[in-house]
């Protein structure tokens, strides 16, 4: 069956997408309004997606970059990011329990603020996740090269990008073969990764506190002043995108009323604590200036400082696992964002085809994987991170606004299992903090983010302006 687009005569289209009869084109795929993704992800899987996505950049890629910008006060930058994320995670949890559908922030905003806002956010989220995934894959490439070096296999940094692109393609194929397969990989990676981090940070924390090892000379906490703390918070906010990615797979979560809030809020709290402790341990070990010189793989030398060659290898292996986990979870979430937008007829309905053999949106996965590989090939770490943060912060702010709008209107279908404590102060602060953090980004990131939003708005007026959505599907 060909693509189904909004009616040319301006008739409104109610529901998730224009109504078509369920039709099997081949033994591989189908297009149907009633097709739903199977609910195979439990609380452990939701936490693994959230924690696994966030740990990668936050702990293994950013410490060197963040310490170079803000010194030891980079710990405060991560703490600020955690607070902003928590202020958004609570409203997102309420919305997710009221609308446990694949698509996450797009779905909430389109139902709370209308089709235009939903289309801009949904399509921008596609690109935001693409930028984030490319960032994680580049980090993975750096750690893969370092892992080989620790094993005595000397390869140059020129292999970073080819390795990143190769594994990006591999993660896309893995997700096509089934969400359960991807979730099992995610669970295993996160369990092993957390074990490594608990041992490393436990020893490093005791050393930094002077309980074991030689005491280190104290360093000025904020050597560059207050402003770099805020600009660094904007840069490292990419580390906190994982909790929202839990919401993008809400349509595949078991018992979403219970598991969605626990997975989103829990992952932010756990990872926020780990980030702050990591920066404390890293700056205590080597100092912020040395960390800045080492860049994306600074944590390898921190591991070597504390535990010798074994510590260096543990961190290299942990970084490899973490960036792998982030990339894998992000490929999954990117495809679900595309799937949700297509189901609402804001993209050609072909993108919402589900593979009958594996039960996955294989066309959406292809539309995710292709752009990810192209951006990964650029290798621009900081730019990729900030553009991803920009587009997500827009979405986060609008999620909070959507919650306020839905609470004010209270449509009949709105019956969340979880309600935000401290309403309306929490969502109002979440919106303000999200939009404010954008102001501390570098101009290039802001311009690229705005350009993407303008392009998505243009697509809406060209292709989908006749589409209307009912409150809850």
Image (cartoon, rainbow, N blue to C red):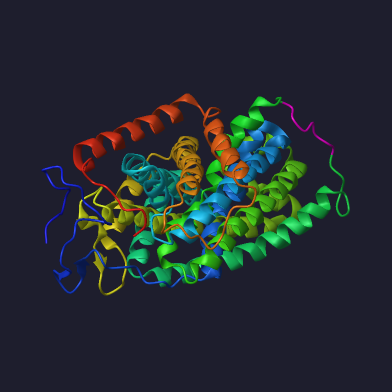
Image quadrant in which you'd find residue 114: top left
Percent from the top left, x then y, of residue 335? 35, 56
Image quadrant in which you'd find residue 448: top left
Using residue 14 as the reference point, say whether residue 216 is left or right of it: right
Using residue 173 as the reference point, say whether residue 322 is left or right of it: right
Residue drawn 24% across the image and 49% down it = 347
Residue 219 inside the magenta-drawn segment: yes
- Quadrant where the image shows the N terminus: bottom left
Query: Residue 184 versus residue 212: which sits nearer the camera?
Result: 184
Percent from the top left, x then y, of residue 384? 45, 39
Residue 429 inside the magenta-drawn segment: no
Residue drawn 66% across the image and 39% down it = 291
Image quadrant in which you'd find residue 47: bottom right
What is the span of residues highlighted in magenta in the rendered image? 217-223
Using residue 344 as the reference point, say whether residue 77 is left or right of it: right
Is residue 150 visible from the viewing direction of this image? no
Percent from the top left, x then y, of residue 299? 64, 48
Using residue 82 as the reference point, say whether residue 386 is left or right of it: left
Query: Residue 58 versus residue 119: which sits nearer the camera?
Result: 119
Percent from the top left, x then y, of residue 129? 41, 47
């Amino acid at each position: 069956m060909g693509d189904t687009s909004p009616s040319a005569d301006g008739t409104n289209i109610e529901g998730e997408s224009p109504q078509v009869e369920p039709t099997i084109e081949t033994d591989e795929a189908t297009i149907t309004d009633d097709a739903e993704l199977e609910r195979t992800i439990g609380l452990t899987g939701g936490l693994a997606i959230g924690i696994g996505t966030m740990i990668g950049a936050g702990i293994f890629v950013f410490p060197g970059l963040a310490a170079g910008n803000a010194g030891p006060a980079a710990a405060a930058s991560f703490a600020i990011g955690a607070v902003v994320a928590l202020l958004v995670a609570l409203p997102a949890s309420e919305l997710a329990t009221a609308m446990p559908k694949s698509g996450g922030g797009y779905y909430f905003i389109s139902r709370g603020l209308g089709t235009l806002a939903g289309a801009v956010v949904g399509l921008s989220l596609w690109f935001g996740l693409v930028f984030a995934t490319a960032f994680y894959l580049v980090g993975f490439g750096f750690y893969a090269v370092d892992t080989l070096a620790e094993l005595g296999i000397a390869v140059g940094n020129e292999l970073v990008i080819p390795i990143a692109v190769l594994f990006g393609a591999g993660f896309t194929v893995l997700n096509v073969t089934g969400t359960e397969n991807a979730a099992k990989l995610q669970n295993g990676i996160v369990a092993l990764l957390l074990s490594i981090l608990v041992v490393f940070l436990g020893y490093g924390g005791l050393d930094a506190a002077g309980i074991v090892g030689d005491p280190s000379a104290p360093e000025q906490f904020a050597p560059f002043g207050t402003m770099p703390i805020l600009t660094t918070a904007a840069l490292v906010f990419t580390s906190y995108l994982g909790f929202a990615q839990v919401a993008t797979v809400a349509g595949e979560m078991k018992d979403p009323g219970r598991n969605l809030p626990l997975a989103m809020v829990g992952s932010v709290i756990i990872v926020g604590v780990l980030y702050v402790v990591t920066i404390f341990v890293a700056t205590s070990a080597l100092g912020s200036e040395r960390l800045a010189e080492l860049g994306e793989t600074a944590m390898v030398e921190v591991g070597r400082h504390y535990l010798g060659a074994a510590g260096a290898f543990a961190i290299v292996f942990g970084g490899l696992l973490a960036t792998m986990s982030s990339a894998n979870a992000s490929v999954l979430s990117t495809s679900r964002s595309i799937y949700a937008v297509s189901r609402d007829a804001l993209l050609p309905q072909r993108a919402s085809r589900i593979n009958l053999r594996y039960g996955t949106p294989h066309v959406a996965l292809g539309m995710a994987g292709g752009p990810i590989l192209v951006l990964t090939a650029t290798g621009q770490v900081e730019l990729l991170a900030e553009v991803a943060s920009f587009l997500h912060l827009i979405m986060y702010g609008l999620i909070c606004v959507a919650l306020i709008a839905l609470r004010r209107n209270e449509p009949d279908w709105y019956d969340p299992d979880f309600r935000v404590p401290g309403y309306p102060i929490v969502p109002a602060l979440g919106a303000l903090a999200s939009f404010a953090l954008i102001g501390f980004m570098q101009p290039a990131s802001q311009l690229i983010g705005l350009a993407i939003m303008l392009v998505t708005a243009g697509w809406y007026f060209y292709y989908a302006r006749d589409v209307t959505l009912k409150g809850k599907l």
